[in-house]
Image (cartoon, rainbow, N blue to C red):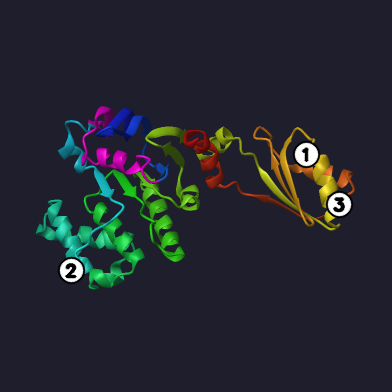
Amino acid sequence: MIEITDLTHRYGSLVALDRLTLHIGPGEVFGFIGPNGAGKSTAMKILACLLRPTAGDARVCGHRVHDSGDAIRGLVGYMPDFLGVYEDLTVDEYLQFFAAAFRIPARNGKRAAVVDSVLQLTDLTAKRHAMVDSLSRGMQQRLGVARVLLHEPQVLLLDEPASGLDPRARIELRSLLTELRNMGKCIMVSSHILTELAEMSTSIGIIERGTLLFAGPIGEAFARAGAGERIAVTLEGGPADARAIAADLASDPRVRSVAAEDRSLTIELAPAVNGHHFLIEAVIARGGRIASFTPRPLKLEEAFLRLTRGAVN
């Protein structure tokens, strides 16, 4: 649904996007990762036809952003990082206004039905008659999502939708995006909260200074970053036992690194190693008695830092 080829944009002498190439399909949640100024918002604005690229090509559902703005605006729901709302309106009035702007007809109750459906989808039905300025930050973000869903877009561009949300609101937003993905929407979402993206994204892109460093499934990002599986082992012996076992394990080619602290070991396997059961045999063979053995999920933050380290230096 989104096809970007060698997309470049300059602000004067500043290169905001440098030959960006991406392909995002239906039912995909693409997590766009990068620091401030990396080019994420610029790419989204181009896809939403709010900014003309300097060079390259971008298509949304087959339509080129250069000459098909009206068609693309009917297919895209764009939510910027800062969502302005009309605070003197109720939630229902706010959505009715934008439904009219999207030219959804009021006759035969169609506009009211559309507003009802997005309120239900975003779990805002109980807030229909509440003033917009009385809503919490999380509910205002949900209202923003409801607004961009009014015209039933096929593609959603969400720029920092979780910014400023409390943990409960983030969980609710993640559930909503999962439901939209299951509806077949193509979703591009940027965020600085990498744990959120790791849980909701089917694929990610890492961008630094306008250059795409990686795009693909999260597992491939870990492999590219050289990050292997991690295991936390707690021993029944003392710190001396942990240090001795750590020194022995460090010489195993299947082990990338071992850190010993008190009675605990944190072991990172080499990226190409599949399976960690050999560690149990290795620890026992070295006289260790295992109190607990816990695989630790890999963190997207570490993959991001490893992949961007060379670009920053």
Residue projecting furthest to the left? 107
Q: Mark 1 and mark 2: span between their CA atoms? A: 63 Å
Relative to 279, 190 lies left or right: left
Mark number, residue 222: none
Q: Position of residue 244 (x, y in %)?
A: 85, 47
Amino acid beneath label 3:
Asp
Task: Identify the residue shown where x is 24% and y is 29%.
Answer: 54
Question: In the shown orientation, is residue 278 left or right of residue 219?
Answer: right
Tag of residue 241 = 3
Q: Nearer the viewer, residue 58 or 311?
A: 311
Indicate left or right for 231 with 169 as reference: right
Q: CA distance from mark 2 to mark 3?
A: 67 Å
Within 10 Å of the Cα at label 1, are there few (<14), some (14-19), or many (20+) other Cα atoms? some
Q: Which residue is mark 1?
A: 250
Q: Position of residue 229 (x, y in %)?
A: 65, 42
Verify whether residue 301 appears in magenta: no
Counting residues from the N terminus, which is met first, the one under dot 2 or under dot 3? 2
The quarter of the displayed image where residue 27 is located: top left
Alpha carbon distance from label 1 to label 3? 14 Å
Q: Residues within 10 Å of mark 2 (few under 14, many from 20)?
A: some
Residue 312 vertical placement versus 19 (above, below): below
The magenta region covers 36-63
The residue labelled by disc 2 is 89
Disc 3 is placed on an element classified as helix
Amino acid type of the residue that numbered disc 1 sits on in the rendered structure: Ala
